[in-house]
Amino acid sequence: MADNRLGPIKLLFCGACQNVNLLRASFCSGVLVLLLAGLALNVAPAAERNAGEDEIHIVQIQGTAEIMSSGARTWVLTQTNQVLHPGDRLRTGSNSRVTLRWSDQSVVPFGALTEVEVLSPDKSDSLPGMSLIKGILSFFHRDKPGRIRMLTHGATASVEGTEFVMRVTEENGRERVLLAVIDGKVQLSNAHGTLALTNSQQGVIEPGQTPACTPGFIANNLLQWCFYYPGVLDLNDASFSLDEAQALTTSLAAYRAGDLLAALENYPAARQPASGAERIYHAALLLAVGQVEQTESELAALPATNQNAPLAIALRTLIAAVKRDPRPTSRNPQLATEFLAASYYEQSRATGEESLKAALDLARRATTLSPQFGFAWERVAELEFGFGRADEASHAMDKSLQMSPRNAQALALKGFLLAARNKIGEATQWFERAIATDAALGNAWLGRGLCRIRTGEAAAGRKDLLVAAALEPQRSILRSYLGKAFADGGEAKLADRELQLALRLDP
C-alpha cells in the first residue's frame, strides 16, 4: 500500500507541471511538494553579505581542471572548493566540465577545453570579472546589474542581470565570439561598435567586424553540453570480445556500479574502439559528460547494418528526450537498452498521466529483460515514487543500489524517499553522497538545498538551489523552487523573475 503522505504527487503529475523537462525527476516534483508545503520551508529573510560570500570557488568538476595562479608559469590540477583570485587562470580538459560559484548569486558552468582568467574588479562596488580566452560557458547571474564584466581578447560583454551562453573559438588565428541571451540584457561590444541583446537574441563578432545580430537560436541545442544524461546502456546488450573486456575491465566495473564518471575516467586514454560494441560504450560514456557532438560522431562511424545499430538508436533517443526533439526512429524496442531510452523519451513527450504510465511500463520491461540492470531499476523507482507508491519505489531503489551502488541518481532518490518520511538528517547525507559521486546532478543539489532550508540553513539552501538551476537551466521545476526560496527569503523581484522563467519553460 502506498504511503498516504505521497498523495499530492499523483495530483501534481496530472497538472501542468508534468509538461516541463522532468527527465529523471518524476519522483522529485512530488516530494518537493511535501518538503515545501507539508514540512514548511521556514526561510529567514536574506541577510547582508559577509566578505567571504563573494569569493570565487569551484563547485563541481567532471573530468579534469587545472589552475595557474597569478604570477605562476605552470598549470596544476585542482579540485572542488578551490578559491580563485584575480590573475588566476582555470582550464578544463577534454571530456570535462567545471562549475564555479562566481558570487553569492552567480554560478558559471564551463564546457570542455575552456580557459578563463579572473579579472580584478574595475569599480569599488564590482565583483571580479572574467576573461573567456577560449571555450564555452553558461552564465547564470542573479546579482545586481553591472557588478561583473566579461571580456574576451577583443570583445566586452556588459552583464545586466541575465543568463547567457558565450563561446570563443579561433578561425585562422583570429577570435570569433558568439553570445546568446537566454534571459535579460547584455551589451556586446568591440572596437568597431556595440550591440544590445535581450531575450532569445544572439550576437556574433566575426574577426575584424562590428558585432552583428544573427538568427534566433534553440536554447536546448546551445546548452546541450551542460545537460545531464543518465545511463541507459545495458552492458548485456553489448557483446565485447575477450580482449576488449580485459582492456576495459576497470571502466566496465565502474559502469556496472553506476559510476559513469569513473567509467569514463578509466577508459584507456587515446584508445580507439575496436568494435561496434565498444564504440557504443564509448559514446555512452561521452554522453554522460554532455559531449553530444562527440557522441554523435562515434555513432555516425557505426554502419547502419551493424548489429549494434539498435543501441546507437537508443542513445539518439535519449538525446532527443533531453533536448525535446522528435524521436529518431519508429522502431519498437526489443532490448533492455532500447526500453530504458524509450521510457525517458515517453516521459519527455508530456502528454498527460498516460505518458508517465507508459514510461513506467517501458522501464519495467527493461528490468524484466535484464534483472541485473541497475540503471533500469532506478528508473522504475523514481517513476513509482512519482505515482506516490513509496513501498514499490523503495523496493526498486534497493534493487538498483544493490546492482549499482554508485549511481548518483539512485543515491539522490534515496535522499528524497527519506525526506518524504521527514528523516531530514539522513536524507541530507544521501544527497551529499550523490553530489560527491556526480556533482552535475541537479536533483542532488536540489534535495540538499531543500533539506538545508528545512533545518534553518536558509542561505546555504538557496545557494544549493541556485546551483541546481544553473546546472540544468532548462528544467522548469528547478526554477520554480528557486523562485519559491527567493520569495520566502524576501527577494520578491528575483522570485518573480524566476517564476516567470519557469512559466516560459512550462507554459
Image (cartoon, rainbow, N blue to C red):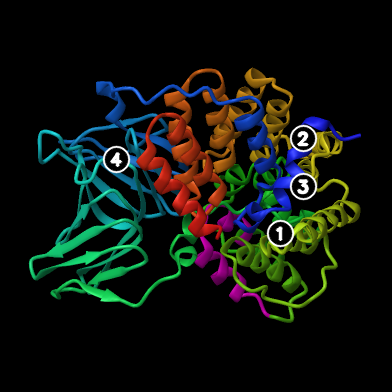
Residue 156 x/y as whole percent: 17, 57
> Looking at the image, can residue 211 be seen?
yes
Q: Answer whether labels 4 and 3 touch (C-beta < 8 Å).
A: no
Crowd tier of the residue under label 4, counting other residues whose Cα lies within 10 Å: few below 14, some 14–19, many 20 or above: some
Magenta: main secondary structure equals helix
CA gap, disc 4 to disc 1? 34 Å
- Upstream in sequence: badge 3 or badge 1: 1
Q: Is 429 placed left or right of 170 in the picture? A: right
Q: Which mark is residue 128?
A: none
Q: Answer whether labels 3 and 1 touch (C-beta < 8 Å).
A: yes
Give the label, 2 or 3, closer to the camera.
Answer: 2
Where is mark 4, residue-wise? 143
Picture layout, residue 268 above or below residue 301: above
Question: For residue 332, which quarter of the picture?
Answer: bottom right
CA gap, disc 1 to disc 2? 20 Å
**Amino acid at the residue labelled 1:** Gln
Q: Quadrant of the C terminus?
A: bottom right
Where is mark 3, residue-wise? 383
Q: Answer whether labels 4 and 1 touch (C-beta < 8 Å).
A: no
**Amino acid at the residue labelled 2:** Leu
What kind of element bears circle 4? loop
Crowd tier of the residue under label 3, counting other residues whose Cα lies within 10 Å: few below 14, some 14–19, many 20 or above: many
Question: For residue 106, which quarter of the picture?
Answer: top left
Q: Which residues are magenta?
A: 283-303
